[in-house]
Image: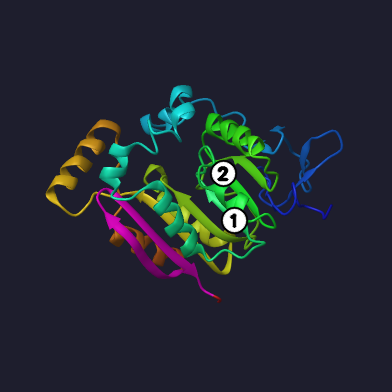
């Protein structure tokens, strides 16, 4: 195996020294090539923050609550008809818009940022047998469920990482595309996370996101205010993302959906 490559083509940086690449060792351990730090893993799931015990916010605690993890992809949660109504778009159409914006090559390495149960990433991995999906999430229960579902589908072209989106542990310019579905509004430091996406993305690569948005009409703004009051989630607007994308260095921001309480946008990393 090529030095510094995990489970195929993932170049994962050691969070301890931020210099060495993590490598597979005999006996199934994961070790840094520079500082020799070791990290636990379960199959293709690497835990880079094993000491993290509690979530920092109510929304994040919800994403680690077993009953929600178990129903996340069902009609009771992410594919709930009522949620679809307020989002103004079905999950299937959202997925098609986002992956279409990424213009994926058949052998692409794709970062599924805040991947959750792999609801987006598994479809990408299935459609790109020569490619690879790297899923990163702060919720270990979500990641464990994702690994179960990847394996159940017979997929092996994936890697899952337990880490914060503001500290993406991948080498510079090591992925060809990044998607972040239904999670951007949960990030504690959105600007830092977008800067990290820019760093790990190759020149010419695309970044596509979907997120909770306040909406344009008084009715949707009222709903948004209730959501913010109950759980602290504040939606992002097209203007918000355009500014954050621009500050990070991205070009050509495109708003692909802005209806109801849902926003889909994409941007491109320039060639230099």
Residue displayed at 87% across by 37% down: 26
State the image coordinates of residue 141 (x, y, percent, origin top left): 54, 29
The first of marks 2 and 1 along the sequence is 1
Above or below, comparing residue 137 to residue 243 in the picture: above
Q: Secondary structure at mark 2?
A: strand
Labels in figure, total: 2
Q: Dot 1 corresponds to which residue? A: 110
Above or below, comparing residue 174 to residue 231 in the picture: below
* Label number found at residue 8: none
State the image coordinates of residue 114 (x, y, percent, origin top left): 50, 44
Residue pushed farthest bottom? 272
Q: Residues within 10 Å of mark 1 (few under 14, many from 20)?
A: many
Above or below, comparing residue 160 to residue 94 in the picture: above
Quarter-of-image position of residue 110: bottom right
Residue displayed at 43% across by 49% down: 92
The C terminus - image quarter:
bottom right
State the image coordinates of residue 40 (x, y, percent, origin top left): 71, 32
Give left or right: position of 33 versus 219.
right
| Segment colored magenta | 250-270
Residue 205, magenta (yes or no): no
Residue pushed farthest right? 26
Give left or right: position of 88 versus 129.
left
Most foreground residue, 139 or 70: 70
How far apart are labels 2 and 1 at the CA level? 11 Å
Most foreground residue, 26 or 208: 208
Tell me the chief SS of the magenta region.
strand
Does residue 169 show up? no
Q: Dot 2 corresponds to which residue? A: 136
């Amino acid at each position: 195996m090529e030095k510094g490559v995990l489970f195929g083509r993932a170049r994962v940086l050691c969070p301890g020294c931020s210099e060495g690449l993590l490598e597979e060792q005999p006996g199934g351990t994961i070790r840094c090539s520079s500082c020799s730090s070791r990290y636990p893993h379960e199959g293709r799931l690497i835990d880079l923050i094993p000491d993290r015990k509690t979530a920092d916010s109510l929304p994040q605690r919800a994403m680690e609550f077993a009953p929600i993890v178990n129903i996340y992809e069902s009609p009771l949660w992410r594919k709930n008809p009522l949620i679809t109504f307020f989002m103004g778009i079905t999950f299937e159409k959202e997925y098609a818009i986002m992956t279409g914006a990424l213009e994926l090559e058949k052998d692409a390495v794709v970062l599924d940022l805040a991947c959750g149960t792999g609801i987006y990433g598994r479809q990408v991995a299935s459609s790109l047998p020569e490619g690879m999906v790297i899923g990163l999430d702060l919720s270990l229960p979500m990641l464990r469920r994702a690994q179960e579902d990847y394996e159940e589908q017979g997929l092996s072209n994936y890697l899952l990482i337990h880490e914060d989106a503001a500290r993406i542990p991948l080498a510079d310019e090591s992925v060809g595309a990044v998607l972040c579905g239904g999670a951007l509004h949960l990030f504690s430091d959105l600007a830092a996370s977008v800067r990290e996406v820019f760093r790990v993305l190759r020149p010419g690569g695309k970044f596509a996101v979907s997120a909770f948005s306040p909406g344009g009409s008084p009715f949707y703004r009222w709903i948004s205010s209730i959501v913010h009051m109950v759980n602290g989630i504040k939606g992002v607007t097209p203007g918000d993302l355009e500014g954050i994308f621009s500050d990070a260095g991205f070009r050509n921001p495109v708003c692909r959906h802005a209806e109801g309480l849902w926003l889909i946008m994409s941007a491109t990393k320039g060639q230099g």
